[in-house]
Image (tube, helix red, strand yellow):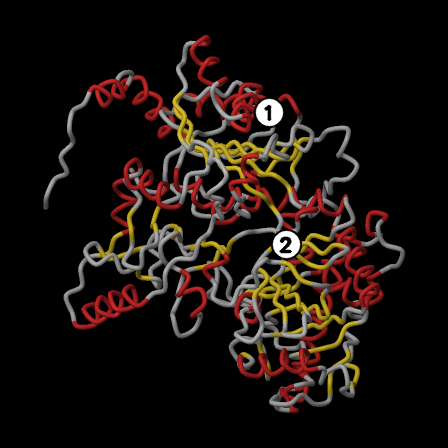
Amino acid sequence: KKTRKYCSTPEFAMSQAGAPERDDVRRLVNEAHKPRAADMASLQALQKTQKEKDATVALRRQESISQSLASKAVPQVQLRSIAFKKQPRHVHLPQSPRSRASMEAKQPEALQDMFHDMGDVGLKPVNVYHNLTTAELYEHALKYEKSSHITSMGALATLSGAKTGRSPRDKRVVKDPASQDDIWWGEGSPNFEMDEQTFKLNRERAVDYLNMLDRIYVLDAFAGWEAGSRLKIRVVCGRPYHALFMFNMLVRPTEEELAEFGTPDFTIYNAGAFPANRYTSFMTSPTSIDVSLEHKEMVILGTQYAGEMKKGVFSLMNYWLPKRGILSLHSGANVGAAGDVTMFFGLSGTGKTTLSADASRPLIGDDEHGWGDRGVFNIEGGCYAKAIGLKAENEPEIFNAIKFGTVLENVVFDDDSRVVDYDASTITENTRASYPIEYIDNAHIPCLAGHPKNIIMLCCDAFGVLPPVAKLTKEQAMYYFISGYTAKVAGTEQGVTEPEATFSACFGSAFLMWHPAKYASMLADKMEAHGTSAWLINTGWTGGAFGTGSRFKLKHTRAIVHAIHSGELERAEYETMPVFRLQVPKGVTGVPSEALMPKNAWVDKENYDATLEELAALFKENFAQFRGGDGHLGVDLSTYGPL
């Protein structure tokens, strides 16, 4: 193979000065925080498959080239005004204090503010790249990161290092006087406390690491599409991959908005390539994701998984929005031709992404939303879709969104053709694709709409005892919202041999800041104020539990969703299901009537009754931790669950 040749220049020679010291630092980092593979070369070897010289691969290559040539042009992401003076994207800052101050003074006011904010925490980088374009970030990733490659469809494939998923046990929240009474602490809470001094130590560690780098990337963007309910977010990081990821996931500013950005509402210091000190107070591993609401900052150490930034912003919005009377929700949302909005709640494997992606209903967003006085809005500017097992025929919207500008995390691809093998889990099962929401052909831009007409709570009941659809009262909606139920099945995780109930409060417990009852109470108030209907849909098993029965057909679930949107289920007759006391319709167009009441589909009726009681007991056991609602509820919701 050809070797790449480099020209020796004075600038190159200067960049090598101090290389031994940087090598020592990198060696210490690797010793303290070893990746899953022995070295980066091993990770890169996992990323690439061996060449397969058979007709199937040849056909895949031919199809890939055809699709690439036929793909539509990438939409304009960042709006620009020709009449408006653009901000410089690259600034070199001398290390001499006097020369540095002189250089900073020559910058536009917006950048002067940025350097002032950095200086307050001791951040004094040599080269700053501010809000680079997608193409520029591609160039930097390919130049400076050996793990970055362009795939056959134009996406940027990269590696997140040793961590290929979130580290929820390493999330820390500073317990400060202003917010400590608001935060959900204790049993079941995802918020592990730390003190302000430890936060400052970790921030200092992150800043010291960022100061050592030859270059840093700064991104200024927004969380939230609704102008009056958005936060200004600043991301400071050392990897172009991280900058491009957040460029996709946040709402991108125009040139005018960028010039007037000012001081951010929240700043993320991502030093994930450098580990936390395990002997520092409150640390339990080399990984730490720390949030200070008082300082309005987040510090990341010991993990390069980009999803930590995305969910860190969502955790912040889960605190900030409810404090302003806006309900934050972990949900998908779409809108009909008449302006009727439907929100979809559901844990992994329930069909939330599939059902919210409806060709006849534009997509508002796939994961995070706010519900305020004017309606719902997407918190994000992009989508973060699972890529494992992705196929064009099953999820065409996602498949077609993978093109220039998309970030593919931890995927495997062919060494020569760069065709991605979406079925490969050599590196991780959690392969992901991050892309701007404009890449979805059916996206509703701007990503905001009116008040929801329907709320659909999805579960995948592997016990096979819940109905395919049930209409919920306001109190039942609060109960099932707090419960956040689904089930794991055998084979999905190591050690799971029988159906296993899983509960995640508000369908996103890991990201909650307030007690779940706070969100449930707000949900009930908004449902009542706007006449919103709530439904429970089971996409799991019927006629028996997993291994005996069969999973509900997708066409039947889609028929149920259509009946909700058409108003058919509002006019339907209902009967009460025993134990869970759910209202089940007697008929739904396109759905077999015997499948609606679960017991009718079971051959062994006694086994059904026993399994129903078993699941009811699990619901009651889980809900016991929320009894009382931490003062947010005016009613004992446990009486609206199973008997």
Residue that extends furthest to the left in the rendered view of this protein = 1
Q: Could you say where residue 200 lies in the image, as x and y percent from the top left?
A: 59, 22
Which quadrant of the structure image shows residue 145?
top left
Q: In the figure, 396 relative to 572: above or below?
A: above
Q: Nearer the viewer, mark 2 or mark 1?
A: 2
From where the camera sits, is residue 246 visible? no
Judging from the image, what secondary structure is the residue with disc 2 in?
loop
Q: Is residue 73 left or right of residue 269?
A: left
Circle 1 residue: 281
Q: Check residue 508 in the rendering and tell me which mark sits there, or answer none.
A: 2
**Which residue in the rendered view is the most extreme toward the front?**
83
**Does 208 sit above or below residue 80?**
above
- In the image, what residue occupies the spot 55% across and 40% down? 256
Determine whether, in the image, residue 115 is placed left or right of residue 574: left
Q: Give the residue type that dot 1 points to.
A: Ser
> In the image, 525: left or right of 314?
right
Report x, y in % for residue 477.
76, 66
Mark 1 lies on a secondary structure that is loop
Q: Is residue 470 above or below residue 263?
A: below
